[in-house]
Image (tube, rainbow, N blue to C red):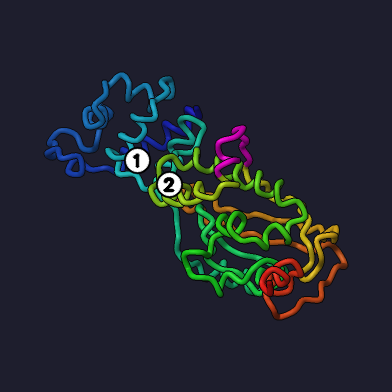
């Protein structure tokens, strides 16, 4: 607990609050909201609240949420109070799913495969490099534009990843870590329930509880579009950038080429060049 920070924050937020906002009548002898007023509104003793504001009492998470309501804190302020008081992020109650024009422009401008997803890995933007190396998400129905569904439901993923099993393990481990951080968010829970319908996902989800937090950069090997399964692949650095706000959740993922490497790419989507996929489609 960062006692000075917690006290500074609470005193500032108390000072900007009005008696009217607390449902109290104006006072003739003194102005302003007191510690006793906040304690009464939060349903705790004056001693407890004063101890929190003065830095010698650690609040419960339940009381932190109550204080957030009483003090009329914004989402960002609530997260800041949690971090200062308990040293951890407040579980997110939702996540952003909207298109961000700035992120989309970055994706389109990059010379590498790049995409943007929300917290549940729904693809919000993807550039031409993604279609050339992996799959053309733009050609899919909107409900299918999802990295998880692609990894576990699209046969070409087992051809483009040199080690699909490792990538699948890591993906499920990331989902498990994010699920714990989000708490209960209906849209994420619905997506997770759908993912558990994939046998390969479910087997990993119910196996050893591996947990993996997205690293800034991870090197993974991918087969060049059109190359056979005997290809050793190209080392691409998967760079993941996520926002600071836990209730945003959107992530930018870029696959950087090795120094000096310049692929010769077709305009066709990767799965239409894959010798395994095309052979199966003509049977």
In this picture, residue 30 sits left or right of residue 78: left
* Residue 188 on image: x %, y %: 44, 49
Using the image, determine if residue 192 lies above or below residue 99: above
Q: Is residue 255 covered in magenta?
A: no
Q: Nearer the N terminus, badge 1 or badge 2? A: 1
Tell me the residue at 74%/66% (across/down): 276
In the image, which residues are magenta?
A: 202-212
Using the image, determine if residue 89 lies above or below residue 74: above
11 or 23: nearer the eye? Answer: 23
Using the image, determine if residue 51 lies above or below residue 190: above
47 or 96: nearer the eye? Answer: 96
Q: What's the magenta bit mostly, secondary-structure-wise?
A: loop
Tell me the residue at 66%/74% (across/down): 128
In this picture, residue 47 sits left or right of residue 270: left
Q: Is residue 203 covered in magenta?
A: yes
What is the residue that sits farthest to the front in this orientation?
283
Mark 2 element type: helix
Using the image, determine if residue 135 lies above or below residue 38: below
Quarter assignment of residue 268: bottom right
Res. 29 in view = yes
Res. 129 in view = no
* Residue 115 on image: x %, y %: 61, 64
In this picture, residue 240 sits left or right of residue 38: right
124 or 85: nearer the eye? Answer: 124
What is the residue that sits farthest to the right in this orientation?
260
Label 2: few (<14), some (14–19) or many (≥20) C-alpha neighbours in 10 Å: some
Q: Give the residue pinned by disc 2.
A: 189
Tell me the residue at 83%/62% (across/down): 258
Q: Give the residue pinned by disc 1.
A: 13
In which quadrant is the C terminus drawn?
A: bottom right
Q: Nearer the viewer, mark 1 or mark 2?
A: 2
């Amino acid at each position: 607990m960062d006692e000075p920070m917690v006290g500074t924050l609470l005193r500032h937020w108390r000072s900007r609050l009005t008696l009217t906002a607390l449902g109290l009548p104006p006072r003739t002898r003194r102005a302003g909201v007191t510690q006793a007023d906040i304690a009464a509104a939060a349903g705790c003793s004056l001693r407890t609240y004063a101890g929190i504001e003065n830095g010698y009492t650690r609040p419960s998470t339940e009381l932190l949420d109550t204080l957030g309501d009483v003090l009329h804190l914004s989402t960002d302020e609530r997260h800041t109070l949690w971090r200062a008081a308990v040293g951890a992020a407040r579980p997110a109650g939702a996540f952003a799913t909207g298109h961000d024009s700035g992120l989309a422009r970055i994706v389109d401008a990059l010379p590498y495969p790049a995409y943007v997803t929300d917290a549940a890995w729904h693809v919000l933007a993807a550039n031409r490099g993604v279609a050339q190396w992996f799959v053309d998400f733009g050609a899919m129905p909107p409900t299918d534009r999802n990295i998880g569904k692609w990894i576990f439901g699209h046969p070409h993923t087992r051809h483009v990843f040199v080690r699909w099993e490792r990538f699948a393990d890591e993906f499920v481990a990331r989902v498990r870590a994010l699920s714990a951080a989000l708490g209960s968010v209906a849209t994420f829970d619905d997506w997770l329930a759908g993912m558990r319908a994939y046998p390969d996902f479910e087997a990993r989800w119910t196996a050893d509880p591996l947990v993996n937090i997205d690293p800034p950069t991870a090197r993974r090997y991918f087969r060049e579009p059109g190359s056979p399964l005997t290809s050793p692949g190209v080392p691409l650095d998967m760079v993941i950038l996520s926002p600071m706000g836990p209730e945003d959740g959107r992530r930018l993922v870029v696959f950087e080429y090795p120094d000096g490497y310049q692929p010769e790419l077709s305009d066709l989507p990767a799965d239409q060049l894959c010798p395994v996929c095309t052979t199966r489609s003509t049977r």
